[in-house]
Amino acid sequence: MSGQWLGRRLNETSAAGWTNYTPCFPIDVKLLFDKVSEDENSQLKFEIACNTRILEIVGFSISLVALLVSLFLFSHFRSLRNNRTRIHKNLFAAMLLQVVIRQIVYIDQEFVRSQIGDQSTSVNASIQGIDNMPYLCELSYVMLEYGISVMFMWMFIGGMYLNNLVSTNVMNDNIPHFVNYVVGWGLPAVLTSIWAVVTYLHYEKEEVKKCWYGYNFEPIYWIVQGPRLAVVSLHILKVLIVKLRASESTDVARLRKAFRAAFVLLPLLGLTNALDMVQAPLDGSVFRFAVWSYVTHFLRSFQGFFLAMIHCFMDDE
């Protein structure tokens, strides 16, 4: 007798011990645990998942700094206060909202896990993170999805702005700001609210209450994802039209730079968002799981940094 409690894995012991709570989980969560536990490489995949979480926290931290610096530059210099940078500021603000929410949730999860690992079982019962706080957890997901929808809407507004510049053949297009704000921030609020209500009613029927686990794999997620994909498709069409018309413009160089920036954002934002609806290949090889994990989490966490680089730090102005 060593005075130690049985741990989670074979031949593993700890002072705090480990309790198997999997029978208390919903069916879909239990199936996930079964799929992972049956894999002989489960420990390697678990370590990869831990590494990608660290990668995300670092990436979101860098993105946070880059976005804040970009917003400061756009607001500080009067020469940058124009319609184009106004659109970029709103795009950055939407991305900043996502980054802040993800960073808070991820750091909270890491803190809770570290406390659970270091404290006794009696103390563990009193430790609660955002994931275990009713309404606060759901609200964080609602605000996250709202920020994503706002980001895509302002990306679309940027495409419309480019199209207007080419159509009018001038670089100072008078865009109705009020309409842009209503479309950019108001329309996503309506769509997100509808999705939030439907999702709440869907999970309210569950016997085991959970914080909207796997909501991005549910069919009702298309309430917000469908309009985003439609916006991406329209944005691609608009950018191609701008490219075809740019040769007739009096300011070809600036329009081409704007076109390249807009075109780069399509795979960076659109593809990364679409990957959220694809489940991780848990039953695949370690190499496949590692490639999928590192690529998707790198793109997701460094989105804000790349956005700031393209629309601010690499801008000639």
Image: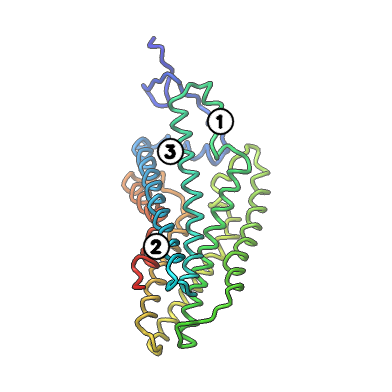
Q: Which mark is residue 23?
A: 1
Residue 189 in picture, x, y percent from top left: 62, 60
Closer mark to the observer between disc 2 and disc 1: 2
The local crowd at label 1, few if under 14, some if 14 to 19, many if 20 or more residues have their Cα within 10 Å, is few
Residue under the point 39% across and 89% down: 250
- First reached walking from the N terminus: tag 2 or tag 1: 1
Q: Secondary structure at mark 1?
A: helix
Asked if the residue at tag 1 contacts the one at tag 2, i.e. Cβ–Cβ closer than 8 Å, the answer is no
Q: Secondary structure at mark 2?
A: helix
Which residue is identified by label 3? 36
Closer mark to the observer between disc 3 and disc 2: 2
Residue 36 in picture, x, y percent from top left: 43, 38
Location of residue 170 with respect to 12 vertically, above or below: below
At label 3, the amino acid type is Val
Mark 3 and mark 1: Cα distance apart in space: 15 Å
The local crowd at label 3, few if under 14, some if 14 to 19, many if 20 or more residues have their Cα within 10 Å, is some
Q: Which mark is residue 208?
A: none
Residue under the point 33% across and 44% down: 286
Residue under the point 62% across and 37% down: 208
Is 50 or 23 nearer to us in this picture? 50
At label 2, the amino acid type is Ala
Q: In the current view of this chain or complex, which residue is farthest to the top?
A: 1
- Left/right placement of residue 154 relative to residue 284 reads right
Is 291 or 308 nearer to us in this picture? 308
Residue 309 in picture, x, y percent from top left: 36, 63
Which residue is identified by label 2? 308
